[in-house]
Amino acid sequence: MESAAIQRWLPPGKAAAVCFSLDDVHPATSRHPYEAGGDLGRGVLGHLLWLLERHRRLAATLFVTPAWRMISGHPTRLLRSRVPWLRHRIHLAPVQPRNALRLDRHPGFCRFLRRLPRTELALHGLHHTRRGDPLHVEFLGRDRRACRRALERAIEIFRRAGLPPATGFAPPGWHLTAELAGAAADAGLEFVASARDLDTPVTPGATAAGSGLRGAPLFLPARLEPSGLIHFTTNFQATSAPERAFAILDAGGLLAIKAHAAKRVGDHVMADGLDAAYRDALHRLLTQLERRYGDALAWTSFGALAAALRPEPA
């Protein structure tokens, strides 16, 4: 896939932009507040709401998995994983029962999502798991038709749950193939976030060289060919220094801040899990940005940017 940076993408009068996104959102997000009958305003969604209430220009893109099944990010059925003819045909770790966490079966959770201010929803796979290893890279090895079926099924679950249809997606494991990009365009999606780079220095023309898609612009939106999808690179998270954010914004770029909805998946601890400590660090950073840049920043979302870059009808 080829990617070309989009040079004119900022709203009039703005010098740079900020987007915030949250991955792995599903009904059992963060200490299972919904399943336990607790208040959805607690836990990770409470941290998100806390930030949105204190930073009135901040917008959020939630990457939601509409039928989440993953329990562990690593194989736990180790003997079976050593059998060549078997290891690609089974789940190598336990998974949630089919449809147990399907969005349309959790109306309270969906009502809470709909009430979040300045928040859009986007897709993060269908199940976020697969047979074989790696477990979490859902679309690995799938052809365009199979990818499209999964994406259309995910969109249909959104509709059944009464949630706004997604206009973009983030592939589980950052794994984007030409087949998946083409399927996303076939399904009517407009944008994708499939690269994360927290280390490459912020210099003119810098490209992503970390997780997921490589060679995409580090801090500018890009158009992927031949799919036509708009691509955004994640370039900041909890482990990043504030100076990286300043460098991206001073360069007239898009500061794309990422968090994950769970601090732990199985035995894997997420460095950017949205716990109280990361929430407070983000609060300090956002306060600095508001004071340092004032009205020069566009506080926007991936969906809003993609919509603004939509080609004019012929």
Image (tube, rainbow, N blue to C red):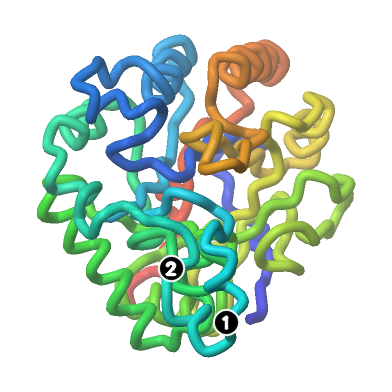
**Label 2: which secondary element:** loop
Which quadrant of the view contains residue 105?
top left
Q: Report if residue 307 is visible in the image.
A: no
Left or right: 152 as drawn, with respect to 14: left
Residue 106, given in percent of the width and then of the height, sits at 15, 39
The label shown at residue 44 is: none
For the C terminus, the quadrant is bottom left
Question: The N terminus appears in which quarter of the rendering?
Answer: bottom right
Among the 4 quarters of the image, the one containing residue 48: top left
Q: Is residue 211 visible?
A: yes
- Is residue 67 placed above or below 186 in the rendered structure? above
Query: Which mark identifies residue 83?
Result: 1
Alpha-carbon span between mark 2 and mark 1: 13 Å
The answer to whether residue 164 is above or below residue 293 is below
- Residue lying at 65% horizontally and 43% vertically, measured from the top left: 254
Residue type at the position of mark 2: His
Residue under the point 52% across and 83% down: 141
Instruction: Locate residue 168: give its quadrant.
Output: bottom left
Q: Amino acid at mark 1?
A: Val
- Is residue 163 placed above or below 6 in the rendered structure? above
Please give the name of the residue rendered at 66% of the width and 12% of the height, measured from the top-left corner. Answer: 284
Mark 1, Cα crowd under 10 Å, few <14 / some 14-19 / many 20+, is few
Q: Is residue 36 left or right of residue 53?
A: left
Q: Secondary structure beneath disc 1?
A: loop
Place of residue 252 in the rendered image (x, y in percent of width and height, measured from the top left): 73, 41
The residue at 84%/46% (across/down) is 199
Q: Which circle, 2 or 1, is nearer the viewer?
A: 1
